[in-house]
């Protein structure tokens, strides 16, 4: 796989992702609730997406020419909020209000409170359908922007995801890029023990998608897969990003289901930050 980033650029992106990890852990600790595991697994992909791929303007979040991003696995919004604050969509001081009454930073993304979002998400599978609707609208309008959507590997148990998997190739939605954060765990246990999905890349290919399987913690691989040059005319794209839930925090990775929806306490926060300091 061709390296499109210099070693310096790749190191800077990885460092930025780890800064976001610190922010995520601190936000969740302050809130006393939320979803650390999936937020930490997704942050490398999201960092590359917002830093190197998406056409967007934080100063003009409703710019018509922007690419659209939908976090279908909406419970992992701490990762999205950390990046949005860093890029200037809202003041970083607001991150401390996560899940507080009246905060714009709800426990799931809510466009009523944070207008820079594209849609509300959180009910699993529905964000994928909403994103496909945005892509169809762009196709009808002959608009040049693309739609990117991140799904969880537990989320793809939902039937409407597989309805969408048929729809996108049938509509030739080459303006649509999906990303599965395949972190191997969901609320009740390991994903493959709950509903076996292998061979996942081959399934998407069989439905007519262009598929790229990458290490979701390797910013070089992620950046390569998300570049416009990977898009094939007339076909939607799916990136299967293999990750670890809670990466790289050892005690979260060791008990991924336990930390699906449990915020770190003060002792766990200190331990997690110390591990990040060693990276």
Image (tube, helix red, strand yellow):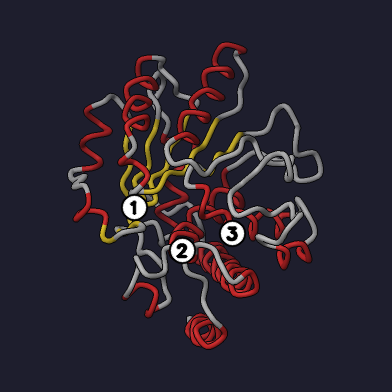
Residue 27 as seen in the image, left or right of residue 112: left
For the residues carrying marks 2 and 1, which lies nearer the camera in this image? 2
Mark 2, residue position: 261
> Does the CB distance between marks 3 and 1 fall below 8 Å?
no
Instruction: Tell me the SS state at disc 3.
Output: helix
**Separation (CA) of disc 3 from disc 2:** 12 Å
Task: Give percent across and percent down for residue 271.
Answer: 49, 87
Query: Circle 3 sits on which residue?
Result: 78
> From what the image shows, is residue 93 above or below residue 105?
below
Q: Nearer the viewer, residue 100 or 219?
A: 100
Q: Nearer the viewer, mark 3 or mark 2?
A: 2
Identify the secondary structure beneath mark 1. Answer: strand
- Horizontal and vertical percent for residue 227? 48, 41
Which of the 4 image quarters holds residue 59? top right
- Tag of residue 182: 1
Residue 224: give x, y in percent of width and height.
Answer: 43, 47
Q: Residue at x 56, y 63 (%)?
A: 13
Q: Is residue 39 above or below residue 263?
A: above
């Amino acid at each position: 796989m061709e390296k499109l980033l210099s070693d310096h650029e790749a190191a800077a992106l990885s460092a930025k992702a780890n800064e976001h990890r610190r922010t995520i852990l601190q936000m969740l600790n302050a809130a006393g609730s939320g979803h650390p595991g999936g937020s930490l697994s997704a942050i490398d992909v999201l960092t590359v997406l917002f830093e190197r791929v998406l056409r967007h303007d934080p100063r003009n979040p409703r710019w018509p020419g922007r690419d659209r991003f939908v976090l279908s696995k909406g419970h992992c919004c701490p990762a999205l909020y950390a990046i949005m604050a860093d890029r200037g969509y809202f003041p970083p001081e607001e991150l401390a209000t996560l899940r507080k009454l009246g905060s714009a930073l709800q426990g799931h993304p809510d466009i009523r409170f944070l207008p820079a979002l594209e849609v509300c998400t959180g009910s699993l599978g529905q964000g994928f359908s909403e994103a496909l609707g945005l892509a169809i609208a762009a196709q009808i309008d002959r608009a040049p922007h693309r739609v990117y959507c991140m799904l969880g590997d537990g989320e793809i148990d939902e039937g409407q995801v597989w309805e969408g998997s048929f729809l996108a190739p049938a509509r030739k939605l080459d303006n649509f890029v999906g990303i599965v954060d395949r972190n191997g765990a969901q609320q009740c246990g390991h994903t493959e023990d709950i509903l076996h999905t292998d061979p996942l890349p081959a399934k998407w290919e069989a439905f007519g998608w262009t598929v790229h399987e990458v290490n979701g913690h390797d910013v070089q691989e992620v950046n390569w897969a998300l570049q416009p040059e990977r898009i094939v005319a007339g076909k939607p794209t799916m990136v299967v990003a293999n990750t670890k839930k809670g990466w790289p925090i050892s005690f979260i990775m060791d008990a991924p289901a336990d930390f699906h929806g449990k915020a770190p306490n003060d002792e766990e926060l200190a331990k997690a930050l110390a591990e990040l300091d060693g990276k």
